[in-house]
Image (spheres, grey):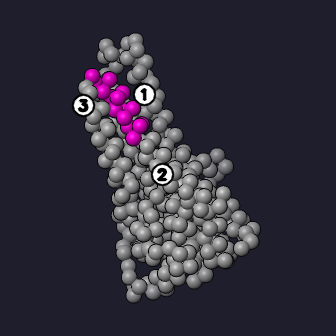
Amino acid sequence: MNLYAQKDSNIRKTWFLLASFLIFIIAVGWVFSYVYDNQSILVFAVIFSLVMNFLSYWHSDKIALAINRAEAIERKSAPELYNVVENLAITAGLPMPKVYLVRDPAPNAFATGRNPEKAAIAVTTGLLDVLDRSELEGVVAHELAHVGNRDILLSTVTVVLAGFIALLSDIFLRSLWWRGSGSNDRRGAGGVLILIGIALAILSPIAATLIRLAISRNREFLADSSGSMLTRYPEGLASALEKISKYSKPMLSASNATAHLWISDPHGRKIGMMAKMFMTHPPIDERITRLRGLKV
């Protein structure tokens, strides 16, 4: 799949996720309304899902920047970083994104924004401390590739919706607990429906999380290759990833909600064979090997 096809695919996936989320919330609202014999719950679920869709599409970038305590900067604050971002954005044919700084000694970076016109790139102070210019260019090109491929829109919407599904499931299970286990509506068809609701409440967050993590891992490989095509120097990013991997401490602002956005796992976790499917990033060694095998 070429890069243009990947961009179109990510846009389609985003709208599919939003539509699926709307349908899921309506279904959950219907189960709630049946269990509590209150149709207003269904109406509330529909309205609330529409509001959440709106917020996840239009404001997920602001939420991600706020969670990571990113500070907007101008050229005079970090001239080399600003120049690297500007030059690579021009080369990629993308609008100049806003540049943010996260005051954290862990070397890392992420991009966010629903489209190239609203994009932002954030890097940590630790990244600026350890990378040389060619390595910094590799990291910035990687993040710009996310912007150009529309990975950011897909990933930010995914994390907002997956988190909300987990919240809904928790509310449903707690509400059943507080109602007690002796209600008459737990017999017959009503009891079966409630059991199905409980099963979905338990399994839905797991499925949503696995899908989110799989999307995150795949987009990292794509951004590595796309960014290397932009700089024409894969070794820059490969060397940057080597330096980043040597820092094993978790970031001060590490959050599970935004871990998938960073170029490297902000928790500093080592990846075992069985744990790969639960990680936000593919192993750095695999990424470096692929980068050094690229021909640009």
Snapshot quadrant of residue 247: bottom right
Q: Tag 1: residue type? A: Ile
Q: Please state the horizontal and vertical placement of residue 57, each as a whole percent of the image.
A: 39, 55
Mark 3 vs 2, N-terminal side? 2
Of the numbered discs in the image, which one, if any, rests on residue 40? 3
Using the image as rendered, state which of residue 274 and residue 40 is in the foreground.
Answer: 40
Q: Residue at x 49, y 81 (%)?
A: 86
**Which marked residue is nearer to the observer: mark 1 or mark 2?**
2
* CB under 8 Å between discs 3 and 2: no
Q: Please state the horizontal and vertical placement of residue 235, each as a whole percent of the image.
A: 68, 75
The residue that label 1 is drawn on is: 198
Q: Disc 1 to disc 3, how far (Cα)? A: 21 Å
Q: Main secondary structure of the magenta part?
A: helix
Of the numbered discs in the image, which one, if any, rests on residue 5? none
Task: Report crowding for label 2: few under 14, some 14 to 19, many 20 or more residues within 10 A (C-alpha).
Answer: many
Q: Disc 1 to disc 2, how far (Cα)? A: 27 Å
Vertical position of residue 215 compared to residue 85: above or below: above
**Which marked residue is nearer to the observer: mark 1 or mark 3?**
3
Q: Tag 3: residue type? A: Ser
Q: Tag 2: residue type? A: Thr
Residue range (magenta): 22-37
Task: Report crowding for label 1: few under 14, some 14 to 19, many 20 or more residues within 10 A (C-alpha).
Answer: some
